Amino acid sequence: MRYDDVLGLIGNTPLVGIHELSPNPDVAIFAKLEGQNPGGSSKDRIALKMVELAEKEGVLRPGDTILEPTSGNTGIGLAIVARRRGYRLRVVMPQNVSVERRQLLEIFGAEIVLSPGGEGSNGAIRMSEQIAVEHPEFVRLFQYGNPANPLAHYEGTGPEIWRDCPEVDVFVAGLGTSGTLMGVGRYLKERNPSVQVVAVEPPSGELVQGLRNLDDGFVPPIFDPDVLDRKFIVRPRESIEWLRELLDRCQVFAGVSSGAAVAGAVKVAAEMDAGTIVTLLPDGGWKYLSSGAWTDDLDEVVERATKINYW
Amino acid sequence: MAVTVRLPTLLRPHADGAAAVEARGGTVGQVFAELAGRYPGLGQQLVDGEGGLHKFVNVYRNDDDIRYLDQLDTKVADGDTISILPAVAGG
């Protein structure tokens, strides 16, 4: 492998068997390790695609400032892409994300604006809208509504899974912006309509404060409910338990939201007679060492996970 | 059929501050109708004018989103838990 610059490393992540975790010997589980991307997460893919599309459409010009609300990974991906391509980046991020995310953003030269932690990503979105009013010259890529987000997965992640694992029966991934599930789900269903697309989500609606009523809720504009076949909640305790199982039994070191994806894959595997599941692990464990996820008392880590935004 | 309905913080004021309430019904819709009888404000929040689920609410039967089961016709059994969560952003 040889690339002219670091952006060439984005995508083409490996699938690795984590069959030890399958409750049924006739169900294989493969994990797609998105932590292998240069910025350490699947968000590198959408960062590059959003910037490329904005350049092509002429909305992004050299020296421009990009403004983006993000809980971290999209910001890190954008920081790398923006720096390579000569843009400035201002990231609006909930105050309660892990310290490593902030450090990485600073290292890559992003300017960080903190939004109230209790308001989660909703608060970051709201604050970025205020900043956009004060700075109409900023370019907003807005991952929640940008078609380049699902497109990056439709053109990259989906075909990679199909190339490496055409026997896939079920795809399981976490639901955040929904970009991964939309892009990969559409691609796999076009190839094989019987592929099941399963979303797992944290019970984040329990934690977000500052909602006055349900009308303050948010559904990403790119989300099309018809792409999914099933959606269920995985709670923080289960996520951390499976994150530890993943490390202890498979020696795969992944981020906290990967624990939820694995929990989802295991739950689906238990209900199948036979077949193959592919689950996507959005990032590696490096950014979560400070969370004590692998080392501290489980109850304490779970308690912390209800206060700190690990998704 | 007695089920437990878990309420998010923002809906608790409509149910005298309770985090969870017991209710009866054979489907999620029947459970919500029974709750709406007791707590009219809660009923208005959950179901829209056309009798469908409010756009920004997610309802789960034992953690499975009922939009991918049988919506409000999703059956519930004795001891099931229905969780109601506002739709919020992730990522």
Image (cartoon, coloured by chain):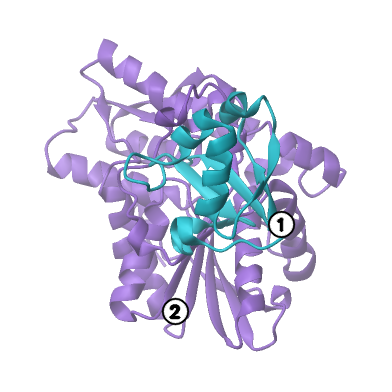
Instruction: Specify the colour of chain A.
Output: purple
Q: Nearer the viewer, residue B61 or A16?
A: B61
Q: Nearer the viewer, residue B16 or A176?
A: B16
For residue A243, the mark is 1
| Crowding near the residue tagged with mark 2, few <14, some 14–19, many ≥20 C-alpha atoms within 10 Å | few
How many numbered marks are there? Answer: 2
| Crowding near the residue tagged with mark 1, few <14, some 14–19, many ≥20 C-alpha atoms within 10 Å | many
Q: Give the side of residue A261 with respect to residue B29, left or right.
A: right
Task: Tell me, yes or no, if residue A40 can be seen here.
Answer: no
Q: Is residue B29 above or below residue A190?
A: above
In which quadrant will I find the N terminus of chain A? bottom left
Q: Is residue A178 above or below residue A69?
A: below
- Residue type at the position of mark 2: Asp
The image shows residue A138 at horizontal and vertical percentages of 25, 22
Quarter of image, res B55 = top left
Q: Give the side of residue A102 with respect to residue A152, left or right.
A: right
| Precedes in sequence: disc 1 or disc 2 | 2
Q: What residue lies at 57% left-to-right and 32% top-to-bottom?
A: B39
- Could you tell me how far apart the alpha carbons at marks 1 and 2 are, in whole angstroms? 24 Å
- Residue type at the position of mark 1: Leu
Q: What residue lies at 84% left-to-right and 46% top-to-bottom?
A: A298
Q: Nearer the viewer, mark 1 or mark 2?
A: 1
In which quadrant will I find the C terminus of chain A? top right
Q: Chain of mark 2?
A: A
Residue placed furthest toward the right:
A297
The image shows residue B61 at horizontal and vertical percentages of 60, 56
The image shows residue A281 at horizontal and vertical percentages of 56, 59
Q: Chain of mark 1?
A: A
Q: What residue lies at 87% left-to-right and 44% top-to-bottom?
A: A297
Q: Which residue is mark 2?
A: A164
Q: Are the residues flagged by discs 1 and 2 from a single subunit?
A: yes
Tell which chain the image draws in cyan.
B
